[in-house]
Amino acid sequence: MRNLGNLFLVSLLSGATTLGAYKFFIEPKNDTSTIAVAPSYTKNVSLSAENIDFTAAAESTIHSVVHVKNMAMQRVYRDPFEYFFGGGRSGGTQQQMQVGTGSGVIISEDGYIVTNNHVIDKASELEVTLNNNKTYKAKLIGTDSKMDIALIKIESDEKLPFITFGDSENVKVGEWALAVGNPYNLTSTVTAGIISAKARDLSNEGLQSFIQTDAAVNPGNSGGALVNTRGELIGINTMISSPTGSYTGYSFAVPSNITRKIIEDLMQFGNVQRGVLGIEGGDLNPMTSKEYGIDASEGVYIGKVTKKSGAEKAGIKEGDVIIALDSKKIKSFSELTSYINTKRPDEVVNVKVLRDNEERIFPVKLVKKELLITEFNGFEFEDMSPTEMKKLNLDYGIKIKTITNENYQEYKNDLEGSIILSVDGIKATDAEKISSYLNKKKSSKARYKILFKNRQVQDIIM
């Protein structure tokens, strides 16, 4: 009996212990206190394309992307000596048709098409083929060789499918994008990838501002569409970075906001209305920040303010650091370039700068690039007109307008009016680009290797 009592007592204690453990550890509590819970890192999160529907964007886009054929008559030298020494030999020359292909994007129902300038360059005849295999002759409306954008037009009796513009400023790194074009003459090809970077400058001069993506782009995709998952145009595919010439990782597109501004200018004015701030400088870096005692680590350090520019008139000075334009934060010169390229002359931009580590805002009225004096150390440069370049059979080059540098007065007559083709191997595609490079390299006795038209390379100390 006694053993039975002990057994009963043990059972009772065991039950009480079990009940207590349940109440304490398992049963939910009814009190209102909050408990911090670490996030679960074991939860399955799928980022695969299978969870995103690309079909609607692809379907709406492929009908608006066209195949562009460039037929150009090229002079072919049958006698190699003809090329080097000109006419007079028996071999002579002949005209030969060369064909290049690319892509284009219909942007209006009445047949306006945007493509790359290099797709239609030097064309004798342009032919456009739609996704339904209908073919049209196209005429050139205008180009912007600096940004590699061209506008062409076809005439059709029916309304054409077109792509609406998205806001490339709102594009975010990591979001999905589709590249649509005609690589290797394979029509209506769609590839997917993500936005890898924005405001990418491959020239290291701060003048480019591409959207970078890892969507596969190959020869023939040039001029095609980069769209978001809603089928909105966010860029014009322009180039690839590849050791092979084909897709190996990244491609680059001109942002849609810049593209839209260019084609609106071409349609309205016949040329691109380019407004400029009138500053030269570069990305702020730790060395610059330390040297000048600047607290910020991002922005554009102003090395020079151009004469007669809006920046000079507004009171912006050398040594200021641009950290924002209007409401857009500026981290690099390429971001500044991207924003300004969407503006026209006479528009006002609120420029926020750091001066003596204090923020100040200057309303700057943009001016026409042609009105600026692009100068370096007593050398004033100017861009050449298309007529001048055509007359001299040049694709690029800038002119030395005047020289006030006392060290070169004895050469003034020889140098003024000379055409510069390159400086230190950098093509002189415009005066602003060369002036910016020279000011970045500036030192007391800097030596520059300058290639003049019809002259040998010369070392010049400026």
Image (tube, grey):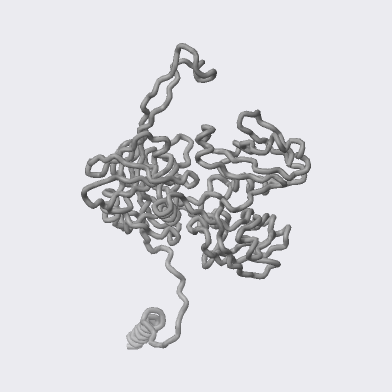
Instruction: Please state if 113 lies on the left or on the right of 329 as rendered.
Output: left
Task: Find residue 90 and report its horizontal and vertical position in percent.
Answer: 46, 11
Which of the pair 14/418 is nearer the observer?
418
Nearest to the observer: residue 16 or residue 300: 300
Q: Nearer the viewer, residue 295 or 226?
A: 226
Judge by depth and name the residue closer to the eye, 55 or 156: 156
For image coordinates 46% across by 71% down, the residue present is: 38
In the rendered structure, the answer to whether residue 120 lies left or right of residue 382 reads left
Taking the image as drawn, is residue 81 in sight? yes
- In this rendering, would 460 be left or right of 297? right
Q: Is residue 10 visible?
A: no
> Looking at the figure, which quarter contains the C terminus?
top right
Q: Quadrant of residue 133?
A: top left
Image x and y of residue 125, in percent: 34, 35
Answer above or below: position of 327 versus 48: below
Q: From what the image shows, is residue 286 above or below residue 405?
A: below
Task: Give the mark count.
Answer: 0
The extreme top residue here reads 90
Q: Which part of the image, by quadrant, shows the N terminus?
A: bottom left
Q: Residue at x 68, y 43 (%)?
A: 402
Find residue 414 and report its image quarter.
top right
**Percent position of residue 37, x then y:** 45, 74
Residue 207 location in percent, x, y? 55, 49
Q: Residue at x 23, y 41 (%)?
A: 134
Taking the spot 49% from the left edge, 58% from the top edge, the residue there is 344
Q: Is residue 437 left or right of residue 35?
A: right
